Amino acid sequence: LTQPRWLNWAIPVISLVGALVVGAIVLLATGKNPLDVYWRILDRGFLSQRAITGTLRTATPLAFTGLCAAAAFRLGVINIGGEGQLYVGAVGAALVGLWVGGSAPVGITIIVMVLAGMLFGAMYASIVGVLRSQFNTNEIITSLMMNYIAGIILNYLIFNSRSYWRDPRSMGFPSGKPLEKRAFWPTYEIFGTSVSFGFLLAIAAAVVLWVLYKRSRLGFEIGIIADSPRAARYVGIRTKWTIVAVTAMSGALAGIGGASQVGDFAHYLDAKGLQLNNFGYTGIVVAALARLNPLGAILVAVLLGGLTNAGYSLQGPDFPSGLVGTLQGLILFTAVAGEILTKYRVRSNSSAAKAVAA
Amino acid sequence: MNSNLFIVIAAQAIFYGTPLFFAALGGVFTERSGVLNLGVEGMMLVGGVTGAWASIHVGGSPWFTLLVAMLMAMAASFANIWKVAEDPVTRQVRKLDVLGLGDTPVLGPLLFNHTILTYMSWVMCAVASWYLFRTKIGLQLRAVGESPQTADAMGINVVKYRYIHTMLGGALAGLGGAFYSLAIVPTWVDGMTKGAGWIAIALVIFGFWRPGLTLLGAYLFGALQSLGTVLKSRSFDIPGDVLDALPFVMTIVVLVLVSTRFAHKRIGAPAALGVPYEREER
């Protein structure tokens, strides 16, 4: 069942327009001028160098969690656990950052932080992968439960214990131990906007993932498993191994996102900040809107990052925070609806495609 | 008062297990019709916020409250019919001492000192079992879940059955959510169900799609949830976070146990669970 190429672009765009239209109705119903609100969103999300800097900052974790979701969804493994895998990645990166950050050379520190984030995220996700492949357990529920558990782990490390991650000087309100300045990840000035190292890493990861899916044997096998697990088994693809490997890879991507939160922005294990933003769940929106295309995920992450940031600046006594969430929800909803509509049309128009599908 | 630790935990388990049971019973109906609804958490939240809102702002006529709540979630409505049982000051659903037996040792806290919603849940459990396994409609419902094609050929309106029972499931999930905002914490806290909807989905599987077993499972998880508060109040030296994580860990364990292939064949999930039915594809 192949679809015309232009749909890859048309569907997100149409979904976005559809969401804006429905959003306008919601805004009108709450007594706002939609055009005015949309202009302010555009202005504060994308139209100045400061706005773009902030947008890229928010987009960085979303890009990673978006890639995390896209990587697993392509195989048909619905990994909702990006949220928890991001937390655990942050725990890992903060661990080595605090450990070697003061002594090791800068470059080495950053590399081991990224690797630790990947390793922790991958290990955490592989629990879900193993349960799915060995015991046929529903990965949606297990990965979701793992998110709650990861949140509890974060709270334990910072608030409820005297762990290595907690700053012993913070007596009143517990917080994470700050990294040494040398362990901070660099930012680069590109055309006047500052771009974090993590964002560049996200782009690199997206390219690698794209090549992996389009040009590698593993990518080919993943496509077969997603289409028909039974056929994949008959041609001798190691289905179980692939499920575990891809889930781990997916977790590793979210883990780098967590590492970037520590290295790029917070510079300590920020138990509260990590849990505040729902990066992992928004990543699922990113992947869905990008139609599981890794490069598209970066674009969508920037878009949603700008929307989120503009939303924060819009918030106030006359503009409740829920409206921004509503708008994001609408975008996802229209995206999914658009997807269904295209599939339906393809089926009803050509009987040949129908025969193939059946 | 009974201070025996075991009895306290058991009584708390029934209290905390009640909303889980409502949501899971809704899941039983929904999934028996072959629809897999993963939105239970959201429905519980809608029910919770509606229940809190209605009891604060609407007050007055229970019938108007009912209408509003039904439009919002179809759900908190149930809780508001029982306004009779509501404490006028805190607007919290009060525990009722049925027959004045609440102080009886052992049986008192277990059986006679609950909110009216808990008693409702027991009645509903019995009614649901009867409905599913002893009535014609229940039989037809199970047929829809097992093989929609066959059911359709028998002249059962598959789509209608699925719609009605998915809505019924949503209403029950909303009722469970309303339990949080009316009985457990008498106000609305953002995201207050904290994953209970997901635990409920696992409970449906754990209860083998049967109301009675689901009730037992709900109390097991209710016990796990209450363990933290109960043990903390008695200064047991167990980190609270470990106890908080227990329900989630247990959910995973339970899922693993029941999704092994051996168990899968014997308990028989509805065969057409999660499979959309389109007549033209036959």
Image (cartoon, coloured by chain):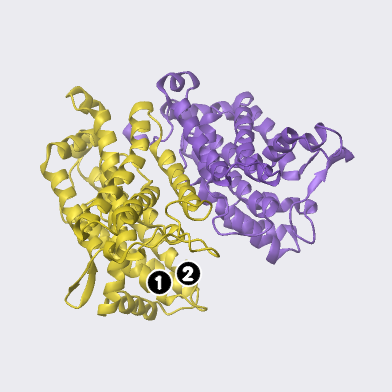
Look at the picture and state if B192 lies above or below A310: above
Chain in yellow, by letter, is: A
Q: Quadrant of the N terminus of chain B?
A: top right
Is residue A291 visible to the viewer in this orientation of the structure?
no
Q: Tell me if mark 2 has few (under 14), some (14-19) or many (20+) residues whose alpha carbon lies within 10 angstroms of its own.
A: some
B274 over A41 or under it: above or below: above
Q: Is residue A300 left or right of residue A213?
A: right
Residues A157 and B201: in front is A157
Quadrant of res A52: bottom left
- Density class for disc 1 (Cα within 10 Å; few <14, some 14-19, many ≥20) is many
Taking the spot 17% from the left edge, 44% from the top edge, the residue there is A2
Q: Tell me where residue B118 sits by quadrant.
A: top right
Residue A21 seen by the camera: yes
Whether tag 1 and tag 2 are in contact, CB under 8 A, the answer is yes
User: Could you say whether the residue bearing mark 1 is in a helix, strand or loop?
Assistant: helix
Left or right position of B246 against B150: right
Q: What residue sits right under mark 2 in the picture?
A: A321
**Figure chain in purple:** B
Residue at mark 2: chain: A
Q: Which residue is mark 1?
A: A311
Q: Residue at x 67, y 38 (%)?
A: B13
